[in-house]
């Protein structure tokens, strides 16, 4: 019996020793990362935080730059009903004729034909269209306008960029100090009056009135864009068409 016990004791001791080793290993605290691994972890964490901040900033800028829908204003010019975005009417003024019943006024940037940007503008760089819509008047019919101007024109004719010809008005006439820009051959496509360019009236706009969709359309525009008259008229007509309801 004694021999049997001595025979099994070594195996029992080995098992007990292995169990103690496993318990000690489980209780050991993980060794700290080497300094190099810790630095890499900090860099990775910093990159992740920077990426999250950049994503949040991009989302903020995207949502912040989305254009807000423009407020529409109902207007009626003669028999024509309009819905005009408020940002196309420009800032309100006490003597603004757009407040008159039966008329509407637009202020458009050139060449975008969008809203005029706020802020001070130097006269030399001012490129905007001031448009007044009013009920039709027979005096603004193309044939009648041309007949009226023809009575006061001089015989001198010279050409202008944009395929226009220019004529002057006689001294003492109601249009003295202006020049008459007309399209060939008969001026029915375009007929505008512009002040003679001098230092005193460098900022004075040209003026044209024509009829479109049952309204008289008066445009005041800078002389600098007169060569683009066809683009201007086409753009204004399309803009007005988009306002009619």
Image (tube, grey):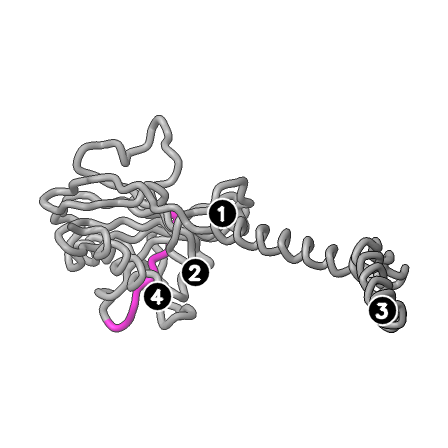
**Image x and y of residue 225, in percent:** 43, 60
Label 4 environment density (alpha carbons within 10 Å; few <14, some 14–19, many ≥20): few
In the displayed structure, does residue 41 sit left or right of residue 17? left
**Image x and y of residue 208, in percent:** 29, 53
Q: Residue 210 carries which label?
A: none
Circle 4 sits on which residue?
231
Q: Which mark is residue 225?
A: 2
Earlier sequence position, callout 3 versus callout 1: 3
Vertical side of 160 occupied by 134: above or below: above
Check if residue 101 falls in the magenta segment. no
Circle 1 sits on which residue?
64
**Image x and y of residue 183, in percent:** 29, 68
Earlier sequence position, callout 1 versus callout 4: 1
Q: Calculate the distance from the C-alpha at mark 1 to the C-alpha at mark 4.
A: 33 Å
Prevailing secondary structure class for the magenta stretch in the rendered image: strand
Q: Calculate the distance from the C-alpha at mark 2 to the C-alpha at mark 3.
A: 123 Å
The residue positioned 28% from the left and 34% from the top of the image is 97
Mark 3 and mark 1 in contact? Answer it, CB < 8 Å.
no
Label 1 environment density (alpha carbons within 10 Å; few <14, some 14–19, many ≥20): few
Q: Give the range drawn in magenta.
A: 177-185
Q: Which mark is residue 1?
A: 3
Earlier sequence position, callout 4 versus callout 3: 3
The residue positioned 83% from the left and 62% from the top of the image is 16
Q: How many labels does the image show?
A: 4
């Amino acid at each position: 019996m004694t021999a049997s016990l001595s025979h099994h004791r070594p195996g029992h001791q080995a098992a007990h020793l292995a169990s103690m080793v496993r318990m000690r290993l489980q209780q050991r605290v993980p060794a700290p990362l080497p300094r190099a691994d810790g630095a890499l972890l900090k860099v990775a964490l910093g990159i992740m935080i920077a990426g999250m901040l950049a994503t949040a900033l991009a989302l903020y800028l995207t949502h912040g730059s989305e254009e807000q829908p423009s407020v529409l204003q109902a207007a009626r010019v003669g028999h024509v009903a309009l819905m005009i975005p408020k940002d196309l009417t420009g800032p309100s003024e006490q003597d603004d004729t757009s407040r008159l019943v039966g008329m509407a006024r637009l202020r458009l940037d050139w060449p975008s034909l969008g809203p005029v940007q706020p802020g001070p503008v130097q006269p030399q760089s001012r490129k905007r269209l001031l448009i007044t819509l009013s009920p039709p008047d027979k005096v603004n019919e193309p044939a009648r306008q041309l007949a009226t101007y023809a009575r006061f024109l001089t015989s001198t004719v010279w050409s202008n960029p944009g395929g226009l010809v220019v004529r002057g008005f006689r001294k003492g006439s109601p249009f003295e100090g202006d020049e008459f820009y007309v399209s060939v051959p008969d001026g029915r496509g375009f007929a505008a009056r512009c002040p003679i360019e001098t230092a005193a009236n460098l900022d004075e706009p040209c003026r044209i009135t024509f009829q479109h969709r049952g309204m008289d359309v008066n445009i005041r525009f800078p002389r600098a864009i007169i060569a683009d008259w066809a683009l201007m008229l086409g753009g204004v007509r399309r803009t007005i068409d988009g306002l009619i309801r």
